[in-house]
Image (spheres, rainbow, N blue to C red):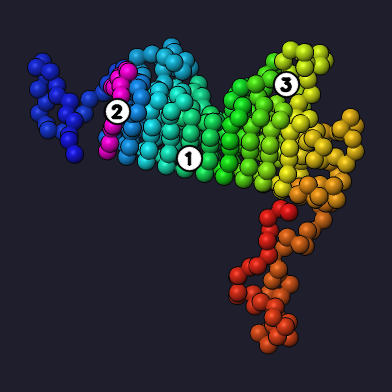
């Protein structure tokens, strides 16, 4: 319950007890701290650099954090980040209106972002910023109404909602770089309305053998340019729902991947076919599916294709509901509202005498989850 005061120097005596100052560079720069806590503080203007161990920032607000003394380096993350944290936990915090720069760089094996809101970020001309890094573990995070090209994927990212990120860029709602997928877990997240970006991506490269063994489950990706584009191999993807995306709903991409050393198949451009060993199960995909794994094709691996499998029985056997394979242009009556054809039946209709529910009874007992 202590109060932190900033006093003017002797050369300027303020005439009011409500003093606001504009910090040109770092408002807070603490290195090698241990066992330190910040609570109930509003940080406004300037930038923050906080390094340490067992450092907690809780119930704080961060607004307009940027360094106005370094406009030439506003695209340079290490030099110009609104908030740079190392081994710091941020809990119950709000981040908003952070322009120009890499807004947040929260890193370190023992870093956590939990129950936080990131909103109205980078609504400025020629921002040049990048996706914020949100700690080694990120959970219960809401990212909305921003032009930051999504967020960087934490090693564990769960129970997050990323919505209305409108930058048309080579970016993703949840983005993991070429080596960011390794033994990562991405689960229980909603990625909505990124019309110029991927909903979720494991990125790659010609020698990007590090983008392997990512686990993805219980993800909803709606209204994005691509719903999900995963490069690499040996990924496990379960319980994904992808629809209303402009290009691919789900794309397990087979390019931009190379096995290391003697495992490399030495195809052109140092290329090894990717996602041949990945797993896709129990998912709902509306109209476009890139899938080179045996889960999507009934014939031997050596003959596997990669684009829009059409064998509906094989797909359903793997728990994959793919609209195009089931005749996408046709109505799927099994997914329609079960009361639809009886909305106008009289209350005395005989159909209700046999136990059929009345339209006003909205209780459902049908399991709509993919098999």
Residue 160: horizontal and vertical position, in percent? 51, 42
Q: Do the residues labelled 2 and 3 touch (CB within 8 Å)?
A: no
State whether residue 160 is above or below residue 332: above
Residue at 43% x, 35% y is 113
**Numbered range of the magenta stretch:** 27-40
On whether residue 35 falls in the magenta region, the answer is: yes
Q: Residue 293 carries which label?
A: none
Circle 2 or circle 1, nearest the eye: 2
**Where, quadrant-wise, is the N terminus in this rendering?**
top left
Quarter-wise, where is residue 363 in the image?
A: bottom right
Residue 349: horizontal and vertical position, in percent? 71, 85
Quarter-wise, where is residue 33 in the image?
A: top left
Residue at 48% x, 34% y is 137
- Disc 1 to disc 3, C-alpha distance: 29 Å
Circle 2 or circle 3, nearest the eye: 2
On whether residue 18 falls in the magenta region, the answer is: no
Category of crowding for the residue at label 1, using alpha-carbon neighbours closer than 10 angstroms: few (below 14), some (14–19), many (at least 20): many
- Say which residue label 2 marks: 35
Residue 317: horizontal and vertical position, in percent? 81, 50
Q: In this view, does 316 lie to the left or right of 197?
A: right
Upstream in sequence: badge 1 or badge 3: 1
SS type, badge 2? strand
Q: Which of 304 and 286 is in front in this view?
A: 304
State whether residue 248 is above or below residue 211: below
- Say which residue label 1 marks: 139
Q: Which secondary structure type mostly characterizes the magenta part of the structure?
A: strand
- Say which residue label 3 marks: 257
């Amino acid at each position: 319950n202590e109060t932190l005061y900033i006093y003017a120097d002797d050369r300027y005596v303020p005439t009011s007890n409500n003093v606001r100052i504009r910090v040109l560079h770092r408002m807070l720069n603490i290195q090698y701290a241990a066992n330190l806590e910040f609570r109930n503080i509003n940080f406004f203007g300037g930038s923050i650099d906080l390094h340490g161990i067992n450092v907690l920032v809780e119930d704080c607000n961060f607004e307009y954090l940027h360094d106005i003394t370094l406009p030439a380096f506003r695209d340079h993350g290490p030099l110009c980040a609104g908030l740079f944290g190392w081994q710091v936990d941020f809990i119950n915090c709000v981040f908003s209106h952070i322009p120009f720069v890499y807004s947040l760089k929260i890193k370190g094996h023992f870093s956590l972002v939990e129950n936080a809101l990131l909103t109205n970020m980078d609504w400025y001309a020629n921002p040049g910023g990048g996706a914020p890094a949100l700690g080694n573990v990120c959970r219960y995070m809401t990212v909305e109404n921003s032009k930051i090209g999504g967020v960087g994927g934490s090693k564990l990212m769960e129970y997050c909602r990323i919505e209305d990120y409108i930058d048309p860029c080579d970016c993703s709602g949840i983005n993991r770089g070429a080596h960011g997928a390794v033994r990562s877990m991405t689960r229980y997240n909603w990625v909505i309305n990124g019309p110029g970006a991927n909903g979720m991506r494991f990125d790659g490269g010609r020698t990007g053998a590090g983008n392997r063994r990512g686990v993805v489950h219980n993800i909803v990706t709606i209204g994005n340019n691509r719903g999900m584009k995963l490069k690499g191999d040996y990924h496990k993807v379960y319980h994904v729902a992808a629809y209303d995306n402009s290009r691919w709903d789900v794309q397990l991409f087979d390019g931009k991947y190379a096995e290391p050393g003697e495992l490399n198949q030495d195809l052109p451009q140092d290329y090894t076919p990717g996602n041949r060993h990945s797993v896709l199960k129990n998912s709902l995909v509306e109209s476009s599916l890139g899938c080179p794994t045996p889960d999507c094709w009934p014939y031997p691996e050596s003959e596997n294709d990669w684009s829009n499998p059409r064998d509906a029985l094989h797909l359903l056997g793997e728990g994959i509901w793919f609209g195009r394979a089931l005749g996408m242009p046709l109505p799927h009556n099994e997914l329609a509202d079960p009361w639809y054809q009886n909305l106008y039946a009289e209350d005395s209709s005989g159909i209700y005498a046999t136990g059929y529910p009345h339209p006003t009874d909205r209780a459902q007992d049908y399991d709509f989850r993919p098999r």
